Amino acid sequence: GAVVSQHPSRVICKSGTSVKIECRSLDFQATTMFWYRQFPKKSLMLMATSNEGSKATYEQGVEKDKFLINHASLTLSTLTVTSAHPEDSSFYICSALDRVNEQFFGPGTRLTVL
Amino acid sequence: GENVEQHPSTLSVQEGDSAVIKCTYSDSASNYFPWYKQELGKGPQLIIDIRSNVGEKKDQRIAVTLNKTAKHFSLHITETQPEDSAVYFCAASKRGGNQFYFGTGTSLTVIP
């Protein structure tokens, strides 16, 4: 199957700093990527849909100014958590749609805000 | 909108036995149903999927069945092994759509 990478896999930062997470589709082009947040033992919570060359579509309740998404190319989307706080600590997962709309997930990024 | 329900939330089986996880969906327009396996600390991995033009698909020890009339689909794992222990998610999507609706997950434990 298609491969999606995420970087970094783990990050620890101080409260008030910003953190950028990269999501790349390695062997296919993805016009659409998704960003999810997952709490322990819970299902995936869709945060936003990232569309190449246009603004991301955010789900209700997700602050677009807090979670900045940029999809500058067909293989890269980035999520920046701005002014991070401890409550932003979570497991963030991206995914990408291939040309037949199959969804492939990245390995996830564990964010810990101190 | 679409609503996907998944049962059971937890499932324990003895090694070698079969495991079945069931999902129902509400939108008859949904026509693509993937299943994902998520191991601890990792992202979900697509393990099998089925489209609405077929009723069953099999890949070695895993199979998925789809009943469009009843709007439910199931994941079957035969001859379970300890490495099958993980959380499994079902999902539903529409043709050409970019929205996926996920079930709440099933935590499968295979007891050696």
Image: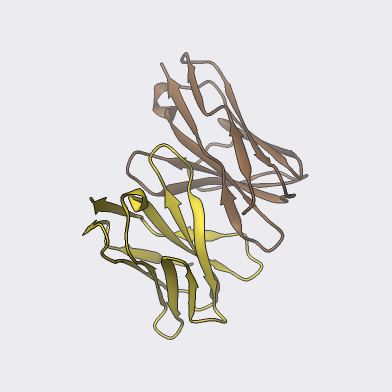
Q: Residue furthest bottom?
A: B69
Left or right of residue B107: residue A48: right
Could you say where residue B63 lies in the image, as x and y percent from the top left? Answer: 43, 70
- The quadrant in which residue A77 appears is top right
**Front-lying residue, B103 or A69:** B103
Q: List x then y, in percent, for residue B27.
A: 48, 74
Asked whether, in this view, residue A35 is left or right of residue B17, the answer is right
Q: Can you tell which chain is drawn brown?
A: A
Which residue is most to the top?
A: A14
* Count of picture labels: 0
Residue B61 placement (x, y as % from top left): 41, 65
* Residue occupying image coordinates x 76% and y 45%: A74
Give the image location of residue A101, x and y in percent: 65, 61
Q: How is the image coloured?
A: by chain
Position of residue A100 relative to residue A37, above or below, is below
Point 50% across, 51% down: residue: B45
Q: Is A87 situated left or right of B53 in this image? A: left
Q: Is B71 rendered above or below residue B39?
A: below
**Residue under the image location 39 percent in, 83 percent down:** B70
* The one of B41 and B18 positioned closer to us in this rendering: B18
Q: Is residue B38 visible?
A: yes
On the image, which quarter does residue B6 sit in? bottom left
The colour assigned to chain B within the rendered structure: yellow
Q: Is residue B33 visible?
A: no
Left or right side of A94 for A74: right
